[in-house]
Image (cartoon, rainbow, N blue to C red):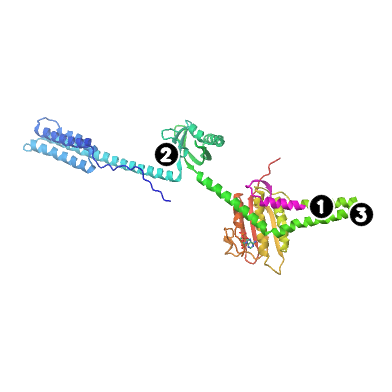
Amino acid sequence: MKRFSTGPSAAPHTEVSPSIWLLRAGAVMLAMIIFLIDWLSSLDVAIAVLYVTVILMCADVFSRKSVMAVSIGCGVLTLAAFLLSHGAEWMVPPFARCLVSLCAIAITAFLAMKHMASRDALQAQIHLLHRSEAFLAGAQRLSLTGSIGLKMPSARMYWSDEARRIFQFDESLQPTLEYMMSRTHPDDIDDLKSLIEQAYARHANMEAEFRLLMPDGSCKSVRMLAQQVEDGSGGCEYIGALMDVTATKEAEEALHRSQSQLAHVTRVTTLGEMAASIAHEVNQPLSAVTTNAEAGLRWLNREVPNLDEVRSAIERIKSEAHRASEVIRRIRTLSRKTDPQHVLLDLHDVLHEAADLVRREVSRHRVSLVLQAADEPVWVRGDRVQLQQVIINLLINAVQAMSGMHGRARTLSVSLGNSEDGDATLCLRDNGPGISAQNLPNLFNPFFTTKPEGMGMGLSICRSIIDAHGGRIWAESELGHGASLNFSLPLCEPVAS
Ligand code: ADP
């Protein structure tokens, strides 16, 4: 919906005020009086010098052209008075007085013109300044960004209109650091205070993101950037911008929510695709349970029951039941809908759990899976379920890519290690058909698929998961020579227990 609104506009100033008319008339009258005295009186003084007052009066009320005309007029009147009173007899003193007056008029006119030129330039600057202020106010309003200034050590503050609006401070109120703190969310006050104190102590710039608790109980998120400027008197001023990022934060949170929902849906879809293998994986220990139970019963039903055999049958039942419940536990963890929880993980464990879940699917497609990993743990910080999802996705993709390949052994080697730049790297390399140079750049785009039944969301979700973990995911391949899909995650130091 388009919205238009207009604010009050200023009327153009074209009318000339009565006081200016009065000044103009006064200047003309004064010029006439000076002319008459200069012409008619017999005083031996340079009366015409008084024309400078006329020029100075005009400088405030006339344009530059008119002041020039008035100055020329005053010169002409001076000459006219001299000619009218001394035209016939030529005498040096009156002529010298006339010359002095003409010089005074010329110098005053020159200075008045200079003054008017700098006044006009100043007015043009003021006009430009007002325009810039209007531009800035508009831009601040649209971008929800205000300006603030904080003088230290007095803690006096300057707030632009938009900054006040963001904090919902009254226009009559002169906001101070205390007011700012009182509007800050109680959970963020201590952090903000120590940030300001540390920045001041270290002569550093400020950068902060904190929340505001508004009078109606709602929350706002603001981002603040401020630069330190020395003020020459030993103190300093922080001058910066303050942006209301509530909408961006809400959009980011909504995006994260939908990304994790989407990740959950695709996890469940992948589990659905592996349903046959999973059923087999659970069925195997269950059959073993039944077989061992029957054997145990047979040992019990003998005339002389063999309790040792019964015991070992029960032991096997216990371990098979445990195996089945482990498979079910892993599947339940994967299918559960929970918010991501970033904890310290050994990537070995995550890899082995993921590989165990797809092992049946891998062998069903006659692929030999080779895991190569160093013995030391590879610590990363992340969400176990999401990282498992990424590995399962990459494993299943490789298996599916190789499923159409005949007459050659299908191998998928997975290596886990540390990269040269200190990251944990997982590399899955298959000897399938590979990926064409044309498809390679689109691999991680949503809905890109070359499979008839494919959704094309798997790799795109893998990328958003790895991105959210501060890592990188990439593919390398040459058509006909297999593909290698890799991701790296920042290594973490395990916390000493
Ligand atoms: P989907 O599996 O639904 O197609 P993905 O995003 O998981 O979606 O995969 C996108 C595409 O990437 C696949 O359709 C396939 O063409 C290609 N691909 C992924 N892994 C491999 C691989 N190991 N070898 C060859 N192509 C692959």
Q: Furthest-left residue in view?
A: 88
Magenta region, residue range: 323-347
Mark 1 to mark 3 CA distance (whole Å): 20 Å
Disc 1 marks which amino acid?
Ile
Q: Nearer the viewer, residue 72 or 177?
A: 177
Q: Are marks 2 and 1 in contact (CB under 8 Å)?
A: no
Say how many tags the image has.
3
Residue in the image at 61% along x and 62% along y: 454
Looking at the image, tell me whether mark 1 or mark 3 is earlier in sequence order.
Answer: 3
- Mark 2 vs mark 1: give the one in front: 1
Residue placed most toward the observer, 141 or 214:
214
Residue 284, x across and y down, in percent = 77, 57
Say what secondary structure mark 3 lies in: loop
The secondary element bearing badge 2 is classed as helix
Image coordinates for residue 342, horizontal then vertical, percent? 64, 46
- Residue tagged 2: 161
Query: How far from the left and from the top, in percent, is residue 370?
Result: 72, 59
Q: Does label 3 point to a residue whose CB lies under 8 Å from ligand 1? A: no
Task: Work out how far the residue at label 2 is from the one at label 3, CA to CA, in angstroms.
Answer: 95 Å
Mark 1 or mark 2, which is nearer the start of the sequence?
2
Which corner quadrant of the image does residue 84 belong to? top left
Q: Note whether residue 396 is visible.
A: yes
Indicate whether 89 appears above or below 409: above
Disc 1 residue crowd, few under 14, some 14–19, many 20+, Cα 10 Å: many
Residue placed under numbered mark 3 in the picture: 302
When the figure is inspected, residue 143 is found, relative to residue 98, above or below; the finding is below
Say if disc 2 is inside 8 Å of ligand 1.
no
Q: Nearer the viewer, mark 2 or mark 3?
A: 3
Kindly state the secondary structure of the residue where label 1 is placed.
helix
Quick check: is 335 in the magenta stretch?
yes
Ligand 1: image quarter? bottom right
